């Protein structure tokens, strides 16, 4: 056997060994034990979610239209979260949306984990707010069911590996925010909680339109979108309590700039646009940040 044949044989054997060690649709992002633990938790969550929907269907006559609208939005969010969860569990390479086009390269399993974690966080906040609204209405059973789901999402967040490690924002340096549709980005990522017109839901989700947190210093809304916001916050004289998830793994720098510029232009007044470079500079300044901001922290800086 000549050297060429020997080399070819060795390469073939190595390739076969590698392929035999791989499992189709599996990922080394999680250990088998971690995967099973998260799958069990997710099955429990899905069961409780179905029970909540069944109770909601039986209580629609007693719920105001704005609460019914929130439930409709919650179901849409749940469907999108489920897609992200299944991609992570299958070990698929997450792909980042750049406007209406897909970026050529996947973000990788680590970024997919962060994206799914952001969905868990968003759903946790949504159910916690729904629990508060039902509590105020005296509907204790619905409040308990929503609170249970919020707690389950909180537990699942802790099961995703390496969420406490910083991630690089998946921005496209060649992107141009002016070529993106800020209104469409808002509808896809914000309207489910803050309303189609960005006017918020009283007592649950603060308005973004004419919000001082949006129209003030550019770095404030950029930091909120990059890292999230948690705790008490006052908006237009009303106090809100909840969780705003990070969108760092779901939006590029250009998309964040386009979305925030849309909200600032839609608000009353004349506010400077947000550029992609603005977002990149803030992201680089706080590249090691892994936890949500508080209102007091944002006010200090």
Image: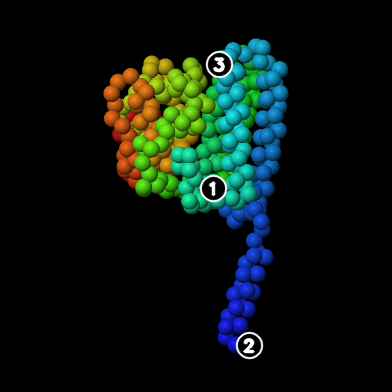
Front residue of 253/285: it is: 253
| Above or below: residue 176 compared with residue 240 | below
Which element carries disc 1, helix, strand or loop?
loop
Measuring from the top left, give residue 264's x and y in whole percent.
35, 26
Residue visible at 32% across and 34% down?
274
Residue visible at 59% across and 27% down?
74
User: Which residue in the structure is indicated by mark 3?
Assistant: 66
Left/right placement of residue 251 relative to residue 12 reads left
| Above or below: residue 249 compared with residue 52 | below
Q: Answer whether residue 155 is visible to the viewer in this image.
A: no
User: Which residue in the structure is indicated by mark 2?
Assistant: 1
Front residue of 76/236: it is: 76
Q: In front: mark 2 or mark 1?
A: 2
Describe the colour scheme in one phrase: rainbow
Front residue of 78/230: it is: 78
Measuring from the top left, give residue 276's x and y in whole percent.
34, 40
Report if the CB atoms under discs 2 and 1 are less than 8 Å apart: no
Residue visible at 64% across and 74% down?
13
Which element carries disc 2, helix, strand or loop?
loop
Measuring from the top left, give residue 43's x and y in whole percent.
69, 38
Give residue 180's mark.
none
In space, the residues marked 2 and 1 are separated at their CA atoms by: 44 Å
Q: Earlier in the sequence, mark 2 or mark 1?
A: 2
Q: Earlier in the sequence, mark 2 or mark 3?
A: 2
User: Which residue in the structure is indicated by mark 1?
Assistant: 94
In space, the residues marked 3 and 1 are separated at their CA atoms by: 34 Å
Front residue of 26/35: it is: 26
Label 3: few (<14), some (14–19) or many (≥20) C-alpha neighbours in 10 Å: few
Left/right placement of residue 71 relative to residue 174 reads right
In space, the residues marked 2 and 3 are separated at their CA atoms by: 77 Å
The quadrant of the picture occupied by the C terminus is top left
């Amino acid at each position: 056997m000549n050297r060429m044949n020997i080399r070819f044989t060795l390469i073939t054997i190595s390739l076969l060994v590698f392929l035999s060690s791989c499992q189709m649709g599996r990922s080394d992002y999680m250990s088998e034990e971690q995967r099973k633990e998260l799958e069990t938790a997710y099955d429990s969550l899905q069961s409780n979610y179905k029970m909540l929907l069944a109770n909601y269907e039986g209580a629609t006559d007693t719920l105001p239209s704005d609460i019914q609208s929130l439930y409709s939005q919650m179901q849409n969010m749940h469907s999108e979260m489920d897609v992200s969860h299944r991609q992570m569990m299958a070990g698929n390479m997450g792909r980042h949306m750049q406007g209406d086009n897909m970026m050529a390269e996947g973000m990788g399993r680590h970024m997919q984990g962060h994206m799914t974690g952001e969905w868990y966080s968003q759903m946790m906040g949504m159910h916690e707010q729904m629990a508060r609204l039902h509590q105020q209405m005296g509907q204790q059973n619905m409040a308990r069911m929503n609170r249970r789901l919020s707690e389950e999402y909180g537990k699942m967040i802790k099961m995703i590996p390496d969420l406490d490690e910083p991630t690089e924002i998946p921005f496209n340096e060649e992107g141009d925010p002016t070529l993106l549709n800020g209104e469409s980005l808002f509808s896809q990522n914000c309207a489910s909680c803050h309303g189609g017109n960005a006017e918020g839901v009283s007592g649950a989700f603060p308005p973004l339109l004419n919000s001082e947190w949006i129209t003030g210093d550019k770095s404030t809304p950029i930091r909120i979108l990059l890292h999230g916001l948690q705790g008490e916050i006052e908006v237009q004289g009303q106090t809100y309590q909840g969780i705003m998830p990070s969108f760092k793994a779901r939006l590029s720098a250009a998309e964040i700039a386009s979305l925030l510029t849309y909200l600032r232009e839609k608000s009353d007044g004349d506010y400077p646009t947000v550029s992609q470079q603005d977002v990149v500079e803030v992201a680089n300044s706080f590249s090691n940040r892994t936890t949500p901001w508080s209102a007091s922290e944002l006010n200090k800086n």
